[in-house]
Image (cartoon, rainbow, N blue to C red):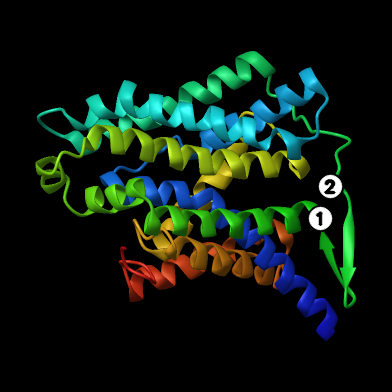
Amino acid sequence: MTMQALVQVLVSGLLMGLLYALIAVGLSLIFGLMDVVNFAHGDFLMVAMYVVFGAWVLTGLDPVLLAPVAVAILFVVGAVTYLGAVRRAISVSSNAGMVQIFVTFGLATLLQGLAQFLFSPDYRSITPSWLASRTIEVGHVFLPLPQLFGGLVSLAAFGGLFLLMSFTDFGRALEATREDKGAVALVGIDSNRVFALGWGLGAGLVGLAGAILAIFYYIHPQVGASFGLIAYVVVALGGFGSVFGALAAGLIVGLAEAVAALLMPPALKSIGIFSLYLAVVFIRPSGLFGRL
């Protein structure tokens, strides 16, 4: 193997890792906020991809321009999911954890069924687009423009999330609610409003990731399942509830996948991800970065 080939593999892994981090960060945010695992997270990604596809069919606009539409719609979907289902699920007097699991898992099944009913199981794609199937060469390393764009958007999203959580009233309310929901109620913060906005923010982030994936990945009702599974691994690897641990873990997962695809048949590349995850679980069950 040449050094150029190795660098190509590592760069490709890092770019996909940034996308994995963007997919996973909303899941980590919601868990850190409420200790709730959203089993419909991957299907929110699928919904965002279909939103972009539908808007492209109707308007003919490029997916890059339609990304804000997907973010806005998924923000509403996330907030409504909390207000309409999750809030009731976590307020039950017994077995609240199991109830919320079944509620979000049922929502995932419902979304997949609706997608299959409305769009059929057929694979769909958006062509042509500004970025699809295009690359740039930097020092003999080829960078696919969709993944490069996605990586830059992911970094920008994490930067915006850092600013939001560090320098805004909502960010401080979010952090305070994560620490002690009962205490924030004493100072007049409505935890239900914070939770609804937190779910909206988490869904909006995965909506952004879905809009980017729609540029170069096939769209079908089960597309969220594989990416959702990777998102769970990223969250667990980085630390449940660790928002910025998801960024580092996403990069690690992307690199592990790329190296595994280099050393074994591409169909077995997921072995690298899950082997790494199992090793971390045995050594550090709380994840590499604990919980923030």
Residue 25 x %, y %: 47, 52
Confirm whether residue 1 shows in the render.
no
At label 1, the amino acid type is: Leu
- 192 with respect to 214 (left or right): left
Residue 285 x %, y %: 31, 68
| Residue 57 position by quadrant | top right
Q: Are marks 2 and 1 in contact (CB under 8 Å)?
A: yes
Confirm whether residue 230 shows in the render.
yes
- 286 with respect to 273 (left or right): left
Quick one: 190 or 85, which is closer to the camera?
A: 190
At label 2, the amino acid type is: Leu
Location of mark 1 (residue): 145
**In the depicted structure, whether residue 46 falls above or below residue 208:** above
Q: Who's the residue at 71% across and 38% down the image?
A: 214
Q: Earlier in the sequence, mark 2 or mark 1?
A: 2
Quick one: 280 or 36, which is closer to the camera?
A: 36
Q: Who's the residue at 71% across and 22% down the image?
A: 54
Disc number placed over residue 131 in the picture, else none:
2
Label 1 SS: helix
